[in-house]
Amino acid sequence: MPYVNIRITRDGATAEQKAELIRGATRLLVDVLGKNPATTFVIIDEVETDNWGVGGESTTVIRRRQK
């Protein structure tokens, strides 16, 4: 029973894109490790950009500066 956890910032991934992530992660485990897709769990956690930081700054601040 593989369990895949994908964490992304909550800022625009569409339902279709998330569905493709789920399909792709499942397909990868089937192709590489021979896992059963029926028992492969893929969870997508969406994190607010204020709660995701890199280099000592939140993603909100970094993206605001990049605009």
Image (tube, grey):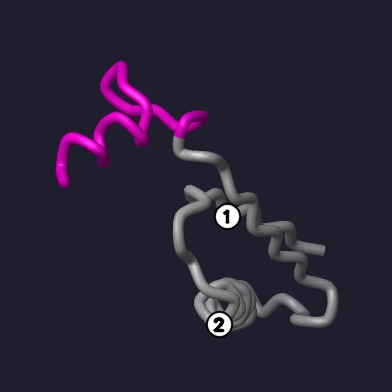
For label 2, the SS is: helix
Q: What residue sits right under mark 1 in the picture? A: 6
- Indicate the position of residue 60 as horizontal and vertical percent values: 36, 35
State the image coordinates of residue 26 (x, y, percent, origin top left). Answer: 64, 76
> Relative to 16, is 61 above or below?
above
Type of amino acid under label 2? Glu
Where are the magenta residues, as a range? 50-67
State the residue at coordinates (25%, 33%): 62
Q: Residues within 10 Å of mark 2 (few under 14, many from 20)?
A: few
Q: Earlier in the sequence, mark 1 or mark 2?
A: 1
Query: In the image, 40: left or right of 17?
Result: right
- Numbered badge on residue 62: none
Q: Is residue 60 inside the magenta stretch?
A: yes
Is residue 43 placed above or below 62 in the rendered structure?
below
Residue found farthest to the left = 66
Up the image or down, 61 lies above or below 2; here it is above
Quadrant in the rendering for residue 57: top left
Residue on which the image places disc 2: 16
Q: Position of residue 41 (x, y in %)?
A: 76, 65
Kindly tell me whether residue 51 is visible in this rendering: yes
Residue in the foreground of this view, choosing between 8 and 1 = 8
Q: Secondary structure at mark 1?
A: strand
Identified at 63% across, 80% down, the residue is 30
Disc 1 crowd, CA 10 A, few/some/many (<14, 14-19, 20+): some
Q: Amino acid at mark 1?
A: Ile
Q: Quadrant of the N terminus?
A: bottom right
Q: Per the image, is 34 magenta?
A: no
Q: Distance between the Cα atoms at labels 1 and 2?
A: 15 Å
**Can you tell which quarter of the image residue 38 is in?**
bottom right
Residue visible at 57% across and 72% down in the picture: 18
For image coordinates 52% across by 73% down, the residue present is 14
Q: In the displayed structure, does residue 29 sit left or right of residue 57?
A: right
